[in-house]
Image: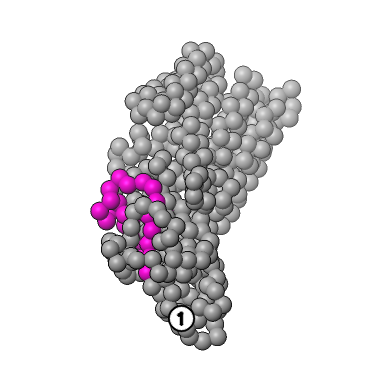
Amino acid sequence: MPRPTASTAPSIATTGRRLAAGIVVATLLALTIVVADLANGGRADPPPLRSAATLLDGTWRFHVGDDPRWANADADDSGWETVDLTAPPGSHDGDVGLPDYVGGWMAHGHPGYHGYAWYRRAVAVPAGHAAWDILGPTLVEDGYELYWNGRLLGGSGRLGANPRVVGTRPLQFALPADAAGTRGVLAVRTYMDPGSAASPDGGGMHTAPILAPRPIGDALHRVQWARSIAGYIVEVVEPVAMLALIGLALGYRSRSNRKGFLAFASVALALMAVRRLENAIVAWTDLESLATYAWLASVLWIPTVAAWTCAWNRWCPRAWRSIDVAALALAVAGMAGAAMHSVAWTSASRFASLALFVVIGVRIARSDPMRRLALTTLASIAASLFGDELLGMIGIPGIWFPFGIGVSRTQYVYAIAIPLLAFLVARTVLPKKAHR
């Protein structure tokens, strides 16, 4: 590893200071954007809008199973169960912070049930010249179709013989032009995929639809989207920061004394960026099904951990071949565990990978001149990869709700790890003359 001479030391210090200043400015800018969006999205719905709309909570008729005739206004639902979609005051979901959250069918007598179920209720539309909209439920497990008097207005995902469910996002449906001044039947066909994880309150609608006149419906729809965007803004800002960090690493790789580290770290950062960006993609668009999302979530951590292990192995003065071989073997074991849905294999692979991080940390502590920054950065990366093993076991919550919007534990860790990693990369950069 080349050592700087007395003549190159000022140049190194100047380069480092410039990079450090840029990192600080970029970090503060990203933090400002995130905080501003969380504060905007976390505001309660404006009272004038909510008072002009009707939350369709209260009693609904409910039936598990599936029959297309249940969409019709004259379908006999007198023998159906009833469920109350009235949310407790201040309730919200445990992820984004969506308001008016209620438990699903698993909390209402159908634990463990997956498949189709229907909700129905009569809705009186006020008379007048206004056009009326239904704002769809903002949280449904997993897909739904919404009908007015048997007419399909739209829905989330594709139901039927081969369902394709996607993340539920704010949707707005126009009622027929002659709906004003009438009383109709609103029916919601819901579907929970058999592969979805079952929770004690899972299944079906978790928020009630809203009846609103236009343009009130338009304004409320924008508010719902502001909340949804705020709920996943970190999942966009942090991947962008990771990609910028890759650019920094590759841009200065030729002048770095840790070329191997930067190469593998760039691969790991790219995988992490894809994994985080996935959350926003599935929440805001229909591009990715929930089945694809779940599969990627179960496997993407495996090459990410392996890439970080190889990267940190090359931070040490001499990489140990045994660590690379072990990282590859554990990746194979992790893939096998994911394919077999084996919790034992997956857990063993994760704990063994964590042990490799500990071994590398000991090596860095013994010999590296930048050990403090390197070990702090290594610890933050390990916490992001092994949050349940390192943070969950000591009682650190998995999610917080600043401004009423959910921010996960992993997102907080990344907010620390990304700037630290950027400073670490900057510390490896040699002046132009020194690396020749």
Q: Quadrant of the N terminus?
A: top right
Percent x, y of residue 421: 54, 36
Q: Position of residue 404 (x, y in %)?
A: 41, 61
Residue 337 higher or lower than 201, as above or below: above
Depth check, front residue: 314 or 147: 147
In the image, is 263 to the left or to the right of 183? right
Q: Which residue is painted at 50% across and 44% down in the image?
A: 162
Crowd tier of the residue under label 1, counting other residues whose Cα lies within 10 Å: few below 14, some 14–19, many 20 or above: few
Picture quadrant of residue 343: top left
The structure residue drawn at horizontal position 29% and vertical position 39%, both measured from the top left corner, is 394
Majority SS type along the magenta span: loop
Q: Amino acid at mark 1?
A: Thr
Instruction: Tell whether position 291 is magenta.
Output: no
Rendered residue at 32%/70% (across/down): 58
- Residue 146 visible (yes or no): yes
The relative height of residue 397 versus residue 170 in the rendered view (above or below) is above
Task: Answer yes or no: is residue 379 visible.
Answer: no
Q: Judging from the image, what secondary structure is the residue with disc 1 in?
A: loop
**Residue behind mark 1:** 182
4 over 243 or under it: above or below: above
Residue farthest toward the bottom in the current orientation of the protein: 128
Q: Which residues are magenta?
A: 95-121
| Total number of numbered discs in the rendering | 1
Residue drawn at 33 percent across, 65 percent down? 77
Residue 405: x %, y % from top left: 43, 58
